[in-house]
Amino acid sequence: MTEKAFAPTVYQSFDTRTDRKTVAPRLKAFRAALAEARLDGFLVPRTDAHRGESVPASEARLAYLTSFTGSAGFAVIGIRKAGLFVDSRYTLQAPAETDTRLVKVIETTQGGLSPQIADFVAKGGKLGYDPWLHTPSEIEELGKRLAGKLGLVPSPNLVDRIWADRPAPPNTPVEFLGHNRAGKASADKLAELRRLLGADGADALVLTVPESINWLFNMRGRDVPHVPVLLCFALVPKTGQPTLFVDRDKITAELRDGLKGLARVADARTMVGALRRLGAGDKRVMIDPATVPLAIANAITGPSESHLIHRRDPILMAKAKKNEVELGGMREAHRIDGVAMAKFLCWFDAEAPKGRLDEIGIVTALESFRREDANLVDVSFDTISGAGANGAIVHYRVDERSNRRLEPGELMLVDSGAQYIMGTTDITRTLSTGKATAEQKDRFTRVLKGMMAISMARFPKGTTGAQIDVLARQFLWADGVTYNHGTGHGVGAFLSVHEGPVGISSRYTVPFEAGNIVSNEPGYYKEGGYGIRTENLVHVVEAPVGGGGFLEFETLTLAPIDTRLVEPRLLTEAERDWLNAYHRRVFKEIGPLLKGEVKAWLKQATAEI
């Protein structure tokens, strides 16, 4: 279908579908289902079978049962007790959303399932889980941790049994990208993928992550909020056509025509049978143990795992290395976004001192400026709009209950992004609304110095994000403070705003390669006071030193940084030069696209310091 006919723009809703008042009756109904199934507890993860950060409304089981709407976490519901496990990003949000009289909120580390699950189920009891929502390694590791305490029992999902008004699965249009947007034919991507399968001795590959499948077949959909993908599974044999498995209602002439000559389309309900036939035929099948559901692995292997080849999704790195067409689209998306940001920041500067803005109004205004461009499809995630103390909540999500008025003189943190038809953006700016304190200017400048240190870094090929993360933190560490989130994550090209396998934090151990795009976003958060974060997206390029053996970053984001919050005496000459050069570039690229007061405002905002 044509780009203009693609799915309508979707914006953040500030009225959530769940409420803590629903927790008690839903837990009661769920426990009745537990008793009927002869189980003593049940695991309810945030994920769906695709393990995506965004899930459709029909898969939001954790939110339905607990009213917690964060993007990560899980619950264990026992006959008498219930626990909601979240990481440090959500320790403030989770208690505010769920009914803490009935659900105990517990902080845990990211990834894996906590052994504290045993505290919510009677010793020796049966803990049920849906094998479509957990990986084999998750269940194996949990089994070891709970040995002698609980027994793990695969089960149909009990949330679905009580969810009377469960939304229908998404059924949205699909579009296929031409060469002017994809930059590489799907047939060529498949040929490269098959060479990798041959090198590993695999007869076939199972793909379960929609971003990988959509990239492979140069298609996009609108099945989940903020990530333009069609939800699907794929089976790619070393020889012969791949099969795309989708819900039956999605099998349209348009989908078949778009994949003609590349892949066949089949009802998702036939996938398990196809996998069983592979196993029975003694075929060796590659799966990603970090993402494949246990139900899929079991269908291939039966009682034996000899047919499985465990490898990281081979598409991840290929997708992360953007080609020149994708990079061109990303640059254009950032120019468009820079125009919207300039209009927003000009508006904000005029309105904030009046004392009438609130967090929802600020998000609405920003999205309205982005909506002025016809290339916008969606926001790339729910905008983080944190006024004053709310800015210190790293993954704060405003709704009608938490909405706060911005008082003149407070800091305002806005982390937002957009999905344009040619690329994805993600930007954070901390904004002044009056005279900042000496402490605030000190912290803002130390965060900015860290962001600039990453921006100016040169490093040998083979360097990982774990190795350069300290560059962003050093100036805060020198003053005895830090921040508890990664410095950067990978970003897709009109795909997910959070993309592996590269990034900047201690957990990213995959080396950078030219073509990678990552965020660069150090921060500082004073609980109960304010939050500071400055974020640009950067692109990994070959450095003009070292005979081709070094890499560096090119900044993609084009929006001014609030220099009123900078303490100039903390900047080195090189840092001052970088900031002034960046602002000159912003005005050079964005200024000609603006008029009147917005252009005049941008001229002033990008003035040298």
Image: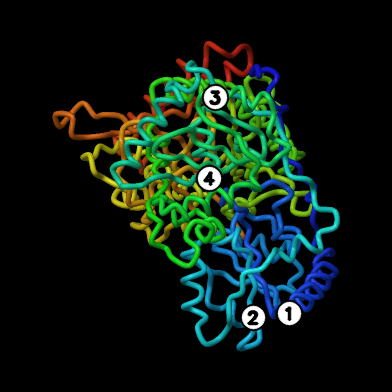
Q: Earlier in the sequence, mark 1 or mark 4?
A: 1
Label 2 sits on a secondary structure element that is strand
| Mark 3 touches mark 2? (CB < 8 Å) | no
Question: What colouring does the structure picture have?
Answer: rainbow
Residue 279 on image: x %, y % = 46, 55
In the rendered image, the vertical position of residue 189 relative to residue 234, given as above or below: above
Pointer 2 residue: 126
Q: Is residue 374 above or below residue 387?
A: above
- Per the image, label 1 sits on a secondary structure element best described as loop
Kindly report the distance in space between the C-alpha atoms of the residues bearing marks 4 and 3: 31 Å
Picture mark count: 4
Q: Are marks 1 and 3 in contact (CB under 8 Å)?
A: no
**Marks 2 & 1, CB-CB < 8 Å contact:** yes
Residue at (50% x, 83% y) in the render:
147
What type is the residue that disc 1 sits on? Answer: Arg
Query: Could you tell me the amino acid type at mark 4?
Result: Val
Residue 351 screen position, x and y as percent = 71, 32
Residue neighbourhood size for the residue with mark 1, other residues' Cα within 10 Å, grouped as few (<14), some (14–19), many (≥20): few
Viewport quadrant of the N terminus: top right
Quickly name the residue at label 4: 209
Q: Where residue 559 appears, x then y in whole percent?
A: 51, 28
Front tag of 1 and 3: 1
Q: Amino acid at mark 3?
A: Gly
Which is more N-terminal, label 1 or label 2?
1
Disc marking residue 38: 1
Q: Of the residues under marks 2 and 4, which one precedes in the sequence? A: 2
Residue at 59% over, 30% down: 220
| Mark 4 or mark 3, whichever is nearer to me | 4
Residue 379 as seen in the image, left or right of residue 202: right
Image position, residue 298 (x, y; %) = 52, 61
Tell me how far mark 2 sits from mark 1, CA to CA. Answer: 8 Å
Q: Earlier in the sequence, mark 4 or mark 3?
A: 4
